[in-house]
Amino acid sequence: MTKRNFLVLLAVLVIACALPFLVSNYRTFQLTLVLVYAIALLGLNILTGYSGQISLGHGAFYALGAYVTAILMDKAGVPYWATVPAAGAVCLVAGFLFGLPALRLEGLYLALATFALGVSMPQLLKYHHLEKWTGGVQGIVIAKPEAPAFFPWVGLPLNSDRWLYFFTLAVALLMFALAWNLLRGRVGRALVAIRDQHIAAEAMGVNGALYKSAAFGVSAMYTGVAGALGAIAVQFVAPDSFNIFLSIVLLVGIVVGGLASISGALYGALFIQFVPNIADEISKAAPWAIFGVFMIGFVYLMPTGVAGAIRLLLAKRRSP
Amino acid sequence: MEAFLHQVMAGLATGGIYASLALALVMIYQATHLVNFAQGELAMFSTYIAWSLINAGMPYWPAFLLTVGISFLLGVLIERIIIRPVENAPVLGVVTVFIALLVILNSVTGWIYTYTIKSFPSPFPKEMSLGKYMSPHELGAIGITLLVLAALYVFFRFTPLGLAMRAAAQNPVSSRLVGIRVGWMLALGWGLAAAVGAVAGMMVAPIVYLDPNMMGGILLYAFAAALVGGIDSPMGAVVGGFVVGVLENVLGAFVIGNELKLSVALVLIIGVLLVKPSGFFGKVHVSRV
C-alpha cells in the first residue's frame, strides 16, 4: 500500500467514525445499511468481478444469512454478535455446495440457474413445514441490540443506533481487510487468471474447480454476513423482502461501483442506498426505472464503474 | 383419477403458455445466443397495451392483432436501439442490459398503470358443453398456441424471409456474403419473439390476472421449458412447455403442494443443466480447446 492510499484510507476512516455524531439517528441507520450493502457487494464482486461467474441470485444468500441470525436470536436466544459468524459459516457451506454443480455452468447458464434460485427463494422461506422456525409469511421480529453499558460509563454518547453503526463498521473493516488480503495475493491472481483464460490457468497448475467453488463459497459468506447485519439493523426478516429484486439491486451495485474493485463496493453501496431515496419522491416506480437506466448507461459508457472512472481520472492527472 | 386428469389438462393449458414464451426465448437464443431475461416483462407490457386498447372500446380480436403488431415493432426497436451496441460485449454486460430492460419495463408499467391488479377478458365463451376437464379459455389458449406454432413453422420453413433469418442465425458471415442483411434479420427475430410473447401474455392474463409482476414465475417456467427441450430447439421448447406445465400442476397438486411450485422450476433448471445441458432435442455443443 502506497503512502498516498494509506492517507486516503485514514481520511475515510476518520469521516466514517465522525459521521454518526453529526447526523440524525435515521441517517445513522441508513449509513449502517450502506456498510451492510458494501459487504454484500464485496461478496458479489469476488464472484462476479474477480472470478467471472455471474450470479443473479445473491439475494438468496443474503436471505439465508438474515434468517440464520433471526432464528438464532429469536428461537435460541443467542446474542446478536455471535450470530454473525454463524450466518457467515452457514452461507459459506451453502455457497460452496451451490458452487459445486454451478461449476459446470458457464456465463448465461449460471445466470439462469442463479436467477431461478433468486426467484424461488421467497417461496422456500414461506414453506409451511419450516414455519415453526421461519415464521412463515409474517417473518420474525428481532430485538434491537443495546449499546454495552461500558460505553456510556466512559462518557461516550452512544445510543443503540450509533452502537450498531460502529459494530457494523468494525465487521465491515474486518471483511474488507480479509478481501484485500485474499485478492491481492495468489488466490486473487488465480481467480482473475481463471476468469480471463481458464485453459491457460489450468495449464499453469491452477485448480479451476476448487477455486471457482471456493469463490462461490466465500462470496456467499460475505453476502450472508451482510444479511445477518442487515437483519439486526432492520430488526425484521420476512420472505418478501428477499425477492429477486434484492438480487438485482446487488447487481446494480457492482455494475455502478465497478467490477473487480474493492473500493467499488462502497460506491455501489452508497448508490443503491441513497439514489432510491431521492428518486422515491418522483414516483413509487421511479427508483427502478432509474436503476435500469443507470445499468444500461454504465454498461455503455463506463463499464468499469465509478471505481474505474476514478482510477482513470487519477492516472490522467498523474501523467501529463 | 378424475382429479388427476383435471390437473393434467390444466397443466397442458398453462403448458401451452409456457411453450409460447419458451419459443420466444429460443428464437432469440438461436439468432443471438443470448437468453432474454426481459422476455416475460416484454410480454407483460404488451398485455397492458392490449388492456388499454380493449378498455378504449376496441373489440377483442382487432385489439389482439394490433397488440401483436405493436409488440413486433417494440421488439425490433429494442434490438436496434438497446441490444445492438452490446452485441459483442462480455456476457455480464449483456445480462446486465437484459436485467435493466426487465426492471425498466416493470417499473414503467407500474408507473403508467399502477400496481393494482386488473382483470383481463378472455375471447372465448364462458360455458361450453364439450370438455368437462378443461375450461373454454384453457382449450382456446392451447388452440391459439398451436396456431402460432404452426404459423411460425410455415414461416421459417417455406418463406424466403424465414430461410434468410435461419441462415443469418446459423452462419452470419456467409449470410452476409450472399447479401442477407444480418442485422435486420436479428431485429426481425426480436420482433417475432416479442409478438409471440405478446400472444402468451394475452392468453395467460385471464388466468393469473394483470399486474406488473405477473410474469416473474411464468418466465421461470419458460426458462425451464426451454432448457428441458433444448435451448436451441423450437420443437423442444414447445414439448418442454407442455411437459413443464403438466409437471408443475401435478406435482403442485399431489406431491409438494402449491407453496413450492416455483421450486419445481428451480430444480428442473439446475437438474437439466447438470445432467443434460443440451435438453431433449438440443444440439450437443462441443467446444474446441
Image (cartoon, coloured by chain):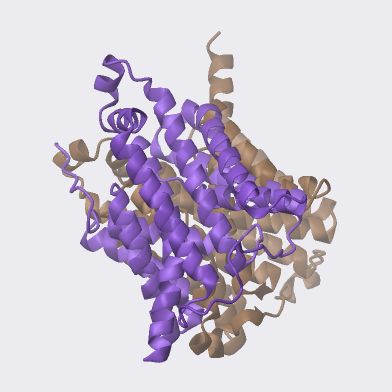
Looking at this view, name the residue that lies furthest to the front. B129
Residue at x 29%, y 55% (from the top left corner) = B236
Q: Is residue B230 left or right of residue B210?
A: left
Closer to the camera, B146 or B14? Answer: B146
Q: Is residue B99 left or right of residue B66?
A: left
Q: Is residue A115 above or below residue B257?
A: above
Q: Colour of chain B?
A: purple
- Across and down, in percent, residue A230 comes to 63, 65
Closer to the camera, A257 or A127? Answer: A127
- Across and down, in percent, residue A100 comes to 28, 62
- Across and down, in percent, residue A296 comes to 57, 35
- Across and down, in percent, residue B10 comes to 45, 75
Closer to the camera, A299 or B236? Answer: B236
Residue at x 32%, y 40% (from the top left corner) = A195
- Quarter the C terminus of chain A occupies: top right
Q: Is residue A97 above or below residue B21?
A: below
Closer to the camera, A68 or B176? Answer: B176
Residue at x 59%, y 83% (from the top left corner) = A136
Looking at this view, name the residue that lies furthest to the top. A320
Q: Colour of chain A?
A: brown
Occupied quadrant, residue A227: bottom right
Q: Is residue B66 left or right of residue A213?
A: right
Q: Is residue B22 above or below residue B135?
A: above
Q: Is residue B35 visible?
A: yes
Number of residue marks? 0
Q: Is residue A270 visible?
A: no
Occupied quadrant, residue A275: top right
Residue at x 82%, y 61% (from the top left corner) = A25
